[in-house]
Image (tube, rainbow, N blue to C red):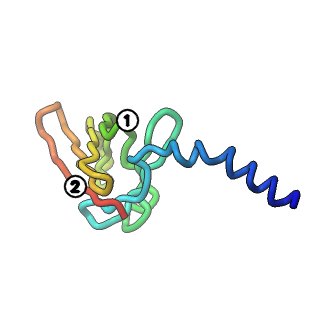
Amino acid sequence: MKTKTIALIAALIAWPALAAADPLEGNWVAATGNTVRISSCGNAFCMKVTSGPNKGKEIGRMQGSDGKYKGTVVNPEDDKTYSGSATLTSANSLKLKGCALGIFCKTQNWQRR
């Protein structure tokens, strides 16, 4: 009985943290077909490749909320960094944009895995 009570209290304490996860967090399939994990890291969201030839590389950091984020994105092929933005277009779709000099931009659409 004591073990069940302790487990219930622990679950209730953890519940707000679980419920407060940002909708950006999770596993996403990039345009390359590789999986990218977006997770909280300090006051930002870090993007890390979790499959494919660039596995383990951090490819960006974003800050924001409510489906709109800004920060940097890194091309894992040449390690060049660009100003970036991410917008959730639905619960399972993300539009990621990277720009050089603010005018030369590329956009990718990612799907939640």
User: Which residue is at the front of the view, 35 or 87?
Assistant: 87
Q: Dot 2 corresponds to which residue?
A: 109
Q: Where, by quadrant of the figure, is residue 8 drawn?
A: bottom right
Q: Is residue 52 left or right of residue 10?
A: left
Residue 56 locus on image (x, y percent):
46, 58
**Dot 1 amino acid type:** Ser
**At x 29% / y 50%, what residue is drawn?**
75
Q: Is tag 1's residue or tag 2's residue first in the polypeptide sequence?
A: 1
Q: CA distance from mark 1 to mark 2?
A: 19 Å
> Residue 47: x percent and y percent?
40, 49
> Please, what secondary structure does the residue beneath circle 1 have?
strand
Residue at horizontal 53%, vertical 36%? 42
Q: Which residue, given by chain and number where applicable, does mark 1 sit on?
A: 65
Which is nearer the eye, 31 or 7? 7
The quarter of the displayed image where residue 54 is located: bottom left
Residue 71: x and y in percent read 33, 35
